[in-house]
Image (tube, rainbow, N blue to C red):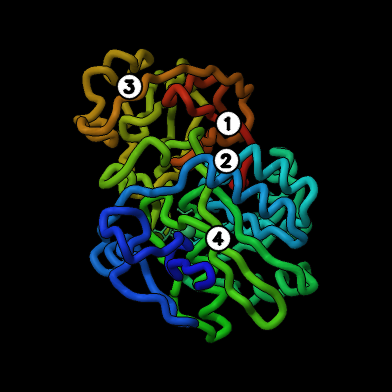
Amino acid sequence: MPEWRCIGCGGPLQNTSPDAPFYTPKSYQEGVPIYCERCYKIRHYGQIKPSFVSERVLAETLTLVESRPGILLWTVDALDFYGSMHPDLIALSAHKRTLLIVNKIDVLPKSLSREKLRQAYLTMAHDAGVSVEDLVLVSALKKTDIDTLIERTRLLSKGQDVTLVGVSNVGKSSVLNAMLGAQQLMKNPITTSFEANITQGLIPFRLKDYTLYDTPGLRAKHAYRHYLSGDSLRRIMPFKEIKPTVFQTVSHRSFFLGGLAYLSFTDEPTGHIATYVANTLLVHARLDENPEAFYDAKVGHLLNPPATTDPSVPLKRTTFELKGAAISVFFPGLGFVRVWGAHAVQVATYEPIEPILHPGVIG
Ligand SMILES: Nc1nc2c(ncn2[C@@H]2O[C@H](COP(=O)(O)OP(=O)(O)OP(=O)(O)O)[C@@H](O)[C@H]2O)c(=O)[nH]1
Ligand SMILES: [Mg+2]
């Protein structure tokens, strides 16, 4: 029997041990696509079972992709560019032709100009050390610009293999489903979910001009999404267009992104900010230059997520000198806060998470 893999997640199917990974009660039939039980439960009941993919399997997948000729479609999340970065992919992009897909463009405010966004992402990619030959803004959810993506992919691949890569949850499988759907080939064959680590192995699709592969997402331990699941994860994920919250003054104030991070300003009579995070992540503003005690008392309750049941992760503080510039503070996994006219800000984040200062995508 040739290699028998689940069409939804790419895991190696077996029909002998119901409690072992990638079980199906069905039998092998040549050319018949079959889903493992885990995929079946995600697709029909939204029940998420743990991932079976180890760091070793992820590393082996990358080594395989690196060793074969072909191009990369590196998919990143439009709101979460820095949470979508990964050192192994930055290194891979240096010697593989790479088309950067900025997905989930539907969650950014519609008022932002496409051309300015394109330039801003090219600058962010360049500054992060990513080598890209081309960049396409898409929404797999709304099927925006999927035809453009298909055409650019065809031009860049010249018949060679095409592999979707990226950290978990950026929408690689959704992009692949959208590409297949736009060519009337198959309707959503690959399993997707708002939870992380859904795809479990390489999933090949032989198309007219090239073979297109989905891959398991790499783990982004430098981003909030890695530390949350269930309802808490759902609260930080934007499912529709975000409405920025504007605060006209920052003077002596602290701003809490749920209970996950905060920004604190001293005397800044001219400063103001706008927060670009999921609408469901409530931003709490407080006239208080010393937010630590308030945070400690309210985290998990008024300031949530995290829920009280989530693992507790200590915070660290970083101070940025802003000198009045218009700049964005990025919180990998959450989004960003645009700051205008402030001279300094103290930022508290989960300890493994590095806040990043960059001009970003807002003018
Ligand atoms: N708003 C929005 N959500 C999207 C879009 N594309 C994907 N999503 C959502 O993002 C989540 C993750 O999508 P997947 O396609 O499973 O992501 P993945 O990168 O394949 O994840 P892994 O298989 O775990 O690596 C799901 O909830 C999708 O519905 C998009 O264009 N816009
Ligand atoms: Mg996937």
- Mark 1 or 3: in front is 1
Q: Alpha carbon of mark 4 to alpha carbon of mark 3: how far? A: 51 Å
Task: From the top left corner, tell me how far across and down residue 248 is, in percent.
Answer: 43, 35
Q: Is residue 189 above or below residue 363?
A: below
Residue 2 located left or right of residue 21? right
Amino acid carrying label 4: it is Leu
* First in residue order: circle 4 vs circle 1: 4
Residue drawn where x is 51% and y is 53% of the image: 216
* First in residue order: circle 1 vs circle 3: 3
The answer to whether the residue labelled 4 contacts the one labelled 3, judged by CB atoms less than 8 Å apart, is no
Q: Which residue is mark 3?
A: 287
Q: Alpha carbon of mark 2 to alpha carbon of mark 3: how far? A: 30 Å
Residue 249 located left or right of residue 92? left
Name the element at disc 2: helix
Amino acid carrying label 3: it is Leu
Callout 4: 10 Å neighbours few (<14), some, many (20+)?
many
Q: Is residue 113 above or below residue 314?
A: below
Amino acid carrying label 2: it is Tyr
* First in residue order: circle 2 vs circle 3: 2
* First in residue order: circle 2 vs circle 1: 2
Q: Which residue is mark 2?
A: 82
Task: From the top left corner, tell me how far across and down residue 52 is, in percent.
Answer: 40, 48
Callout 2: 10 Å neighbours few (<14), some, many (20+)?
many
Q: Using the image, tell me which numbered label, if any, was put on residue 202.
A: 4
Q: Alpha carbon of mark 1 to alpha carbon of mark 3: how far? A: 25 Å
The answer to whether the residue labelled 2 contacts the one labelled 1, judged by CB atoms less than 8 Å apart, is yes
Residue 229 located left or right of residue 342? left
